[in-house]
Amino acid sequence: MKERIKVVVTGAAGQISYSLIPRLVDGHTFGDKIVDLELVEIPQVVDKLQGLIMELEDSNFPNMGNVNFTSDFESAAKDADWFLLVGSIPRGIVFNGKKIEERADLLQINGGIFVGQGQAIGKYGKSDAKILVVGNPANTNALIGRHAAGNDSQLWMAMTMLDSSRARSVLSKKLNVGIEDISKMIIWGNHSPTMYPDFENIISNGELGKNLIDDMNWVNNDFLPIVQQRGKAVIDSRGASSATSAAKAALDTVIACENPTKSGECFSAAVITDGSYNLPHGIVCGMPLMTTSEGSVEIVRDIVLSDFAKEKIKISTNELIEERSAVEDLLK
Ligand SMILES: NC(=O)c1ccc[n+]([C@@H]2O[C@H](COP(=O)([O-])OP(=O)(O)OC[C@H]3O[C@@H](n4cnc5c(N)ncnc54)[C@H](O)[C@@H]3O)[C@@H](O)[C@H]2O)c1
């Protein structure tokens, strides 16, 4: 009998999910396991998920198990192994009669969603459940969800893999090497334009990034702004936020957590700080992670940070502290 895994996806009728969900059951992400899906949406659009389910059935995915759709997050959460929390309210939408333009409003509204979902995950999710928050503001949503869950054996992450993939893509062009020739692409801080993509600690063909890249003019005027502003550049061009690349990044994060990390390597996601690297306590911050052979995900603690990196990371952690203050009432 094949092993089964239960995966909950919120925002299942949205753009990212349309790219993400089929690839959860195609045999690549979870290997041989049979994947049971719980697709969650708000009541207004939940029925649309029937169309997606028809398409999943029509695709004949060999590893697809039971597929349910619901707007009841609590029932979906029961005994789930993975939660991919994509659902959130985007900036610019009219919510309760008010157009949501300010980051503070966005933090409050989306933060509110993560209180309820966090409580349900803490209560009904598997004790070793892994949770990947994709919906923005991802780090602070994860902080709120984790707090509401109150279950330290579960792993809450916010997605920074897309930022890491973007940075690898820019660096591979600069160094004229393949994507696979760049590893240890760490994103520090917030999934926002303050993030710090750590070019100094990448490894490319056995060489450290700081020995390969000495053009600080390029770093400051090209590399950092391109990576930090890439999300906006996609929105400006496409009129919608990154979807297929975000879905791929979510899948890459799941794969990185499901398989032991090769010795000396790491991957990027944001997790709760624990004093490593002198990062401020009590924020969900982008850091280097590794998956052990026993399957637990841990912070990699031996990265050496330059003064330049520390200065940049501080800007981003300060922003995370500000975001935390804006949702203080949700963290009581
Ligand atoms: N972390 C990252 O790297 C990254 C990258 C790209 C996009 N994002 C974020 O991902 C989110 C989703 O993007 P998208 O393009 O799929 O948006 P979308 O608007 O197409 O879809 C979002 C879906 O979430 C649903 N939703 C809202 N509240 C919900 C709730 N409480 N429960 C369940 N579903 C709910 C909406 O009905 C909608 O269908 C956005 O917040 C976006 O900013 C994050």
Image (cartoon, helix red, strand yellow):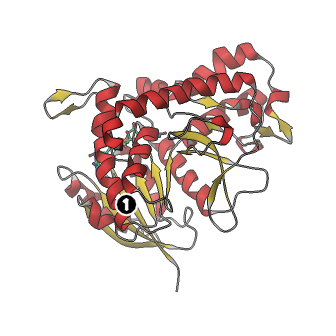
Taking depth in this image into account, of 136 and 319 the one nearest to the observer is: 319
Taking depth in this image into account, of 33 and 81 the one nearest to the observer is: 81
Residue at the disc numbered 1: 121
**Could you tell whether 202 is left or right of 41 in the image?**
right
Residue 18 horizontal/vertical position (percent): 38, 51
Taking depth in this image into account, of 87 and 121 the one nearest to the observer is: 121
| Residue at (64, 31) in percent of width and height | 197
Q: Quadrant of the C terminus?
A: top left
| Residue at (47, 65) in percent of width and height | 25
Residue 3 horizontal/vertical position (percent): 52, 79
| Residue at (46, 25) in percent of width and height | 232
What SS does tag 1 mark?
helix
Name the image quarter holding residue 123.
Answer: bottom left
| Residue at (15, 35) in percent of width and height | 96
Residue 287 horizontal/vertical position (percent): 62, 41
Residue 72 horizontal/vertical position (percent): 23, 61
The amino acid type of the residue labelled 1 equals Ile
Residue 234 seen in the current view? no
Give the quadrant of ligand 1: top left
Name the image quarter holding residue 221.
Answer: top right
Count up the numbered dots: 1
